[in-house]
């Protein structure tokens, strides 16, 4: 809940790429002042400030920290943990892009630090903020579909399809040991557990590298991952993650099938839900009279006026700031959720290496990543 007379939050941005733009727009939409930006080098900071319309380019993270209340970390993956730690140690609130850290140990340390300092610390698992994802949660976790039997999730993109498609994410030194799974599989796992209201307890995964060389460099991280999963309540399922599926742009689809019906959320058609039934199926539109309160809260325009990715992102940032102001909006993804994603990502890599099921049943204990028979 923001107080009408409270001064606008002062926001700083670390990073100058695509995500920095999205975070800056969302911060402005939530009524904050974006007062400073810092990027990899002073001249890049000046360029980022110009591109993002921010008045001040900081020379260092320390300089940025002196001017702000909250920092959005949008730098390359391997630097997230160091930046987030610096923000927390300065006693400031933080929004950190995923992966929160490139190891579960790193993410665990940050989750503990955030709890110790008592600040708001969030990770943009923004697909939770589609109104119809909240409605899906009501249908699934709320018991509407009955006992969960199977789950099926896909997150497919094609921007790494060609051999010469490459960027900083291909280099494990900058991006970490997982590429496709850490980047988009993490969203799929977060959304599955959020909608289902229960955790994955074990995974068995295979990774695929489509091109051994990209941009003249050996490729060490996965273009695709396929995982079998078992859920806490006994449901079984599969998750398919790929950055090389021609024609698929941001195809995140989740199907949860229960004893009494199914629910399907498709993020490229986020204003509707498919409700499957043996005697007949329906498509539920984002239309206030039929929606649960949490979905109504996030519906910022009336039915028939399409909502999408940027609305979900804006809602995530607005809820982060509402939490800083003392509110408690439902479903905010915190550093504990960032740690959870790091645990499942590490388990996927471990399973593929060891050819075995890996246990991920403990919510936030990175030591839980271990083999099971
Ligand atoms: C690139 O794969 C990317 O921008 C991801 O990093 C985001 O998390 C996802 O929402 C869209 O695709």
Image: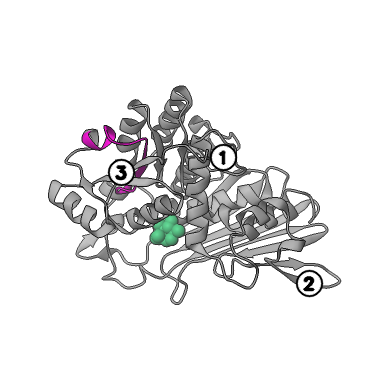
Instruction: State yes or no: discs 1 and 3 in contact (Cβ < 8 Å).
Output: no
Q: Residue at x 36, y 55 (%)?
A: 19
Q: Is residue 311 left or right of residue 168?
A: right
The mark that comes first in sequence, 2 or 1, is 1
Residue at the extreme right of the image, as rendered: 279
- Judging by the rendered image, the residue that carries numbered circle 1 is 1
Quadrant the C terminus occupies: top right
Residue 79 lies, in percent from the top left, at 29, 42
**Which is more toward the observer, 370 or 333?**
333
Residue 64 is a magenta residue? yes
Kindly identify which numbered label has been placed on residue 71. none
**Between marks 2 and 1, how big is the CA–CA gap?**
38 Å
Q: Residue at x 63, y 73 (%)?
A: 304
**Between marks 1 and 3, how big is the CA–CA gap?**
34 Å
Residue 88 lies, in percent from the top left, at 37, 30
Q: Characterize the local packing of mark 1: few (<14), some (14-19) or many (20 or more) Cα atoms within 10 angstroms.
A: some
Quadrant the N terminus occupies: top right
Secondary structure beneath disc 1? Answer: loop
Tell me if I can see residue 355 in this picture: no
- Judging by the rendered image, the residue that carries numbered circle 3 is 78
Point out the stretch of residues depicted in magenta: 63-79
Vertical order, 161 against 125 (above or below): below
Q: Residue at x 26, y 71 (%)?
A: 164
Secondary structure beneath disc 2? Answer: loop
The mark that comes first in sequence, 3 or 2, is 3
Q: Which circle, 1 or 3, is nearer the viewer?
A: 1
- Judging by the rendered image, the residue that carries numbered circle 2 is 281
Tell me if I can see residue 319 in this picture: yes
Residue at the extreme left of the image, as rendered: 43
Image region (quadrant) for ligand 1: bottom left
């Amino acid at each position: 809940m923001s107080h009408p007379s409270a001064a606008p939050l002062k926001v700083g941005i670390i990073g100058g790429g695509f995500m920095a733009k999205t975070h800056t727009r969302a911060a402005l939409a939530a009524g904050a002042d974006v007062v400073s930006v810092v990027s990899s080098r002073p001249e890049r900071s000046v360029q980022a400030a110009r591109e993002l319309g921010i008045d001040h380019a900081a020379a260092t993270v320390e300089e940025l920290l002196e001017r702000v209340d909250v920092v959005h970390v949008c730098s390359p993956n391997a630097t997230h943990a160091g930046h987030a730690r610096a923000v927390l140690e300065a006693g400031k609130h933080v929004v950190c892009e995923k992966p929160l850290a490139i190891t579960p140990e790193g993410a665990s340390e940050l989750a503990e630090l955030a709890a110790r300092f008592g600040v708001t610390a969030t990770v943009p698992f923004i697909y939770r903020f589609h109104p119809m994802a909240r409605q899906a949660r009501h249908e699934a976790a709320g018991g509407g579909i009955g006992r969960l039997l199977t789950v099926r999730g896909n997150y497919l993109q094609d921007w790494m399809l060609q051999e010469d498609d490459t960027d900083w994410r291909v280099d494990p030194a900058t991006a970490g040991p997982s590429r496709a799974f850490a980047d988009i599989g993490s969203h799929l796992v977060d959304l599955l557990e959020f909608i289902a209201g229960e955790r994955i307890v074990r995974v068995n995964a295979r990774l695929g590298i489509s091109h051994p060389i990209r941009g003249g460099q050996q490729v060490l991280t996965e273009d695709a991952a396929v995982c079998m999963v078992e859920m806490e309540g006994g449901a079984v399922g599969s998750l398919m993650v790929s950055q090389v599926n021609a024609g698929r742009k941001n195809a995140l689809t989740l199907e949860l099938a229960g004893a009494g019906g199914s629910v399907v959320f498709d993020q490229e058609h986020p204003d509707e839900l498919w409700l499957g039934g043996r005697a007949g199926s329906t498509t539920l539109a984002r239309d206030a009279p039929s929606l649960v309160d949490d979905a109504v809260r996030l519906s910022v325009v009336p039915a028939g006026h399409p909502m999408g990715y940027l609305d979900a992102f804006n809602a995530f940032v607005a809820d982060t700031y509402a939490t800083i102001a003392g509110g408690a909006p439902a479903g905010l993804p915190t550093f504990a959720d960032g740690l959870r994603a790091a645990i499942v990502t590490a388990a996927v890599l471990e399973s593929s290496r060891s050819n075995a099921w890996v246990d991920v049943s403990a919510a936030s204990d990175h030591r839980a990543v271990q083999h099971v028979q």
